[in-house]
Image (cartoon, rainbow, N blue to C red):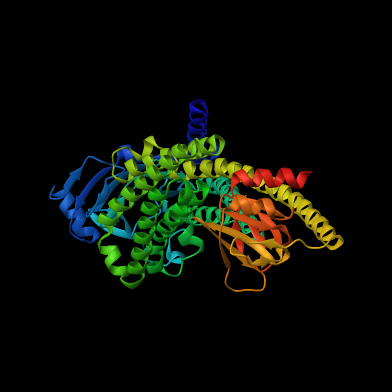
Amino acid sequence: MIRIIFQLAFIFFLITQTEAQLKLNGDASGYYLNDVVQVNSTKDTLDGQQAWDRIKEEEMELVSEKVNPGITNLAYWIQIPLSNKLDETELYLEVDYAQLDYLQLFEIRNDSAIQLFETGDRFKFDLRPLQYRNFVFPIKINQSESKLFLLNVDKRKSAVRFPLKIYPKTSFWRMYNQETIFYGFCFGFLGLVVLLSLIVGLRLKFSIFIWYALYVLTFGLRCFAKLGYGYQFITSDYPELNTHFFPFTTQLAMVFLIMYIQRYFDTHQTMPRFNRVMNIFLALFVGSSILWFLFPSFIVNAAPILISMRYIVVITIIAFAYASAENYMRIDPFSARIFLVGYSVFFLGVFSQILMEYGAIDRSLVPGEPLFAGFFIEVGVLSYAMIAILMNIIKEKNKLAFTNIQLGNLVEKFEKESKEKETPYVVLKSKAVVDPHRIRYIQSDDHYLEIYLNDKDRPEIDRNKLSSILDVLPAQFVQIHRSTIVNLEFVKTIYGNYLLLNDGEELKLSRTYKSRLEERLAK
């Protein structure tokens, strides 16, 4: 199992590398700029000329972190010196991070800051300089010419990153086409998983497939938004809605993940106390979602605290998952191991993302989007587990169908035999005489028996033992539980660990007596 985890970790690394190589290798080459830039920060909101004057006078704090400051309440001003040694004069400057509220690009000419572009998530998507998921600024620099640009990045009370790259125009569009194919395949696969899981869940009426589909859907939308495609294709005309779309899909994904874990490991039966704790978290998520809907501005203002809390909750859910899998190992080792393998890769992505959000690791050290790569591999592994679950369900349904055919044949045999001979009446200890064909089932309650008849609302009560009355009953009466005897003439079907009677009432079928019943039906 450890070897499998390492193999999947390698695949995780390969996917993140592949994602990065779409921008770094071959004809779609781009160049990282952060090593040559200078970054200043301030709490003040300034225009370009004010910022440039402060920078010249060394009145603005110089920042050592040039890519990923983490969660902050500052505005950043980035000096970008560019010299064109390429054949092309049309270049594209990219900020490789989609969640930024406000950006301005200035060109420094004759000691003046001339604004070229103004954009960000505060503006409608079609107002961007280039219709792309990230922020891209078309600039023109003649061959052998040097220019100085000043970039303002402003996103308060949240995580900030500004990886910078420069592309020749033709190289950028080659990268764009390769990237579109890559992410088209990834999200197409996720969409197929969602569709098939919903079809199976609704057709077979198994909720685990529905919760799995909703988890993949909502976390897939979260990744879609994180990469910038959410604003480009879903919320492009609604900047305020876009502000909440990414974190809200994250929250919904956690809700459906908990529901999925509960069904996958049957925590209601296997870990009842643990299940109650998970239900508390579900209630907190639902309550916070209502609060979010009623007071959206409060959520935005409390973003730094909520981001930290969100990661604490995510880590707690991961702990839930691992604890549930460890406990389930004794019940179904295969399903538990498959889950652990997939979730371990997802955890690697989550951990990398948290370190990036807080600025603990350099953005350039983790190419691509590690959380998306981990999630993509997790879905692949868990989908394999869901296929195995589906195969077991189909096998069990076929077995139950065969058992029900045998049951029907046996009931038909009993009915035929009962017509051929006079019905023996059962005399109870209370001296009451009962026609056994009227008895639907009998339940034991300590030293008394409750005899349920098909033509009476209340049961007959008799002081007797279940084993004693079973000896005097006809062959169509079988024991299905340590406290229950049923008349097979009134049984409609068997499903799982239950018998369904003709009137819709359900009776519990214990594992011990289920095997005995199956043996009897097989005769």
Residue 177 coordinates in the image, percent (x, y): 57, 48
Residue 278 coordinates in the image, percent (x, y): 39, 52
Residue occupying the point 45% across, 70% down: 237
Quadrant location, the C terminus = top right
- The mark tally for this picture is 0
Residue 151 in view in this figure: no
Residue occupying the point 42% across, 38% down: 348
Give left or right: position of 495 versus 337. Answer: right
Residue 388 coordinates in the image, percent (x, y): 63, 42
User: Image height check: is 18 above or below 195?
Assistant: above
| Res 69 quadrant in image | top left
Residue occupying the point 79% across, 53% down: 410
Nearest to the observer: residue 81 or residue 400: 400
Residue occupying the point 41% across, 64% down: 242
User: Image height check: is 38 above or below 220?
Assistant: above
Give left or right: position of 48 versus 191. Answer: left
Nearest to the observer: residue 31 or residue 142: 31
Residue 254 in view in this figure: yes
